[in-house]
Structure formats: structure tokens, C-alpha cells
Amino acid sequence: SITSAKIQVNGVHLHYQQTGEGSHAVLLLPGMLGSGQTDFGPQLKSMNKQLFTVVAWDPRGYGKSIPPSRDFPPDFFERDAKDAVDLMQALKFKKFSLLGWSDGGITALIAAARYPNLIHKLVIWGANASVTQEDVRIYNGIRDVSKWSEKVRKPLEELYGHKYFAETCEAWVDGISRFAENSDGNICQQLLPDIKCPTFIIHGEKDPLVPQAHAEYIHKHIKGSRLLLMPEGKHNLHLRFAKDFNREVENFLR
């Protein structure tokens, strides 16, 4: 069974879902506009509930963690990282692993670097530590949500309503594109060497949103990290190939 609740963290009421009674706590961090419900159905349902206690959160301004409305100040990834860690501590988990997808992967990288004593293991996929001009071009390609496939668009429209969904996507494109103005397009490159926990990077070779060079860069700069390339994987490889993904991740987390 999956329980849903809200807890006050850093002045906001964060929504989360929780399942399993294992001794190994795992936090699932969703991507842009994502929530536990929209981004991690197969993980909440099928991850080993004897081994793991699985928590999926909605970052502030996303999912059911509204209000506040979502905004994208220059430190929004740092803010999410602090919220995520503080949420797990508020839930009384002393140490936990992070599974971060896309934006959630960036958040997880920052959290693992900033709070090394709290993070047990780290799994990320579809994440990047910098923003290139090519990335900005890709982001602008998804700015207009009316051009998204119905399959991806529909659950988010149902969750947010069209207006909030469309406006927040545009604000995200502007917010993340700003990193391209930094030296080397830096988001969190300088933090990668500070990540000391065992790290598993998964990348779909057909990911249309995040070029493979990003995964390779992260792998190269996190000492001892492991990189798995999935030849048929796209950006949502954990949904499309949930069984394989869950197996690989559980084996790594054991």
C-alpha cells in the first residue's frame, strides 16, 4: 500500500508518497513539472518492499506541493536539494539513497555533494551538470506544451490544469537556460568531485532531451561511479523499461 501525506519543511508543505518497510530508505526525485505520482508509478508499485522504504516527493510548486507556485530563481536546484534532504530528515530517516531523474538527477547530485554523511547511494538518469547552447536549443523545442505528445501532456494537464502547466514549462525553459550564461554553462560541475557515495549513472542512448556527453562527463568526474548505457532507452527509460531499470537499480542498492 502507498500512503500519501504532507509535512512542513522550510516553510512549505511538501507532499510525498511512501511505501515499503525495508531498512534501506530511498528517495525518488522527479523531473521538471514532475511528481511522485506522474514520474514513478512503476517504482512505487514494484520496488522490493521488504528491502526498501520508498519515498517519492513533489518538490515545491510541483504536484501536490502547491502552494507555493513554482518559480526558478538562480538557486532553484540548491533549494530543491535542501528541501529533499530536510524532508527525509523530517521523516526521521538518518541515512538514505537518492534516485534522481532529469532535474531530479541534478538535485540529487547537489544533495549527495552537499550532505555526504546522509547519502548512502546515488542513482541518476537523464541528468546534466551543465547547460550548453545545444541544450538551450533542445529546451526551446519543448517550450510550447501544446506540441508535446498527448501521452506525456495529458497526465500533467490533469494534474495542473492547462494554464499552470504551460506557464510553468515556459518559466522552466527560461530558468534552466540561464545556466548557459555561466562559465562552461555550469550548474554543479564543481561539486561532482565531492560526491563520495557509490554512484550509478544510467543513460538512454536515444534520449532526445539530454545528450550522452552529459552522462559521460558526470561519470568521468565522480570517482568510482558506474555508467550503464541503455541502447533503446529514451529520457523516460525508467517507465518504458521499468522491469530492467528496477532490477539494475535494486542490484546496485543492495
Image: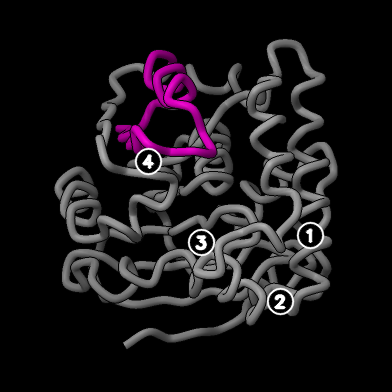
- Marks 4 and 3 sit apart, C-alpha to C-alpha, by 15 Å
Which quadrant: the N terminus?
A: bottom left
Identify the amino acid type marked 4: Leu
Whichever of callouts 1 and 3 sits on the residue coming sooner in the sequence is: 3
What residue is drawn where x is 63% and y is 77%?
7
Secondary structure found at label 4? strand
- Marks 1 and 4 sit apart, C-alpha to C-alpha, by 28 Å
What residue is drawn where x is 26% and y is 37%?
230
- Marks 2 and 1 sit apart, C-alpha to C-alpha, by 10 Å
Number of other residues with Cα within 10 Å of mark 2, as a class: few under 14, some 14 to 19, many 20 or more: some
Number of other residues with Cα within 10 Å of mark 3, as a class: few under 14, some 14 to 19, many 20 or more: many
Identify the amino acid type marked 1: Thr
Return the residue at label 1.
168
What residue is drawn where x is 24% and y is 66%?
47
Number of other residues with Cα within 10 Å of mark 1, as a class: few under 14, some 14 to 19, many 20 or more: many
Whichever of callouts 4 and 3 sits on the residue coming sooner in the sequence is: 3
Task: Inspect the magenta stretch and tell me whether residue 163 lies in it.
Answer: no
Identify the amino acid type marked 2: Tyr
- Marks 4 and 2 sit apart, C-alpha to C-alpha, by 30 Å
Whichever of callouts 4 and 2 sits on the residue coming sooner in the sequence is: 4
Return the residue at label 4.
122
| Residue 90 seen anywhere in this rendered image of the structure | no
Return the residue at label 3.
88
**Region of the chain picked out in magenta, as a range:** 196-221
Secondary structure found at label 1? helix
Where residue 243 sits in the image (x, y, percent)? 19, 60
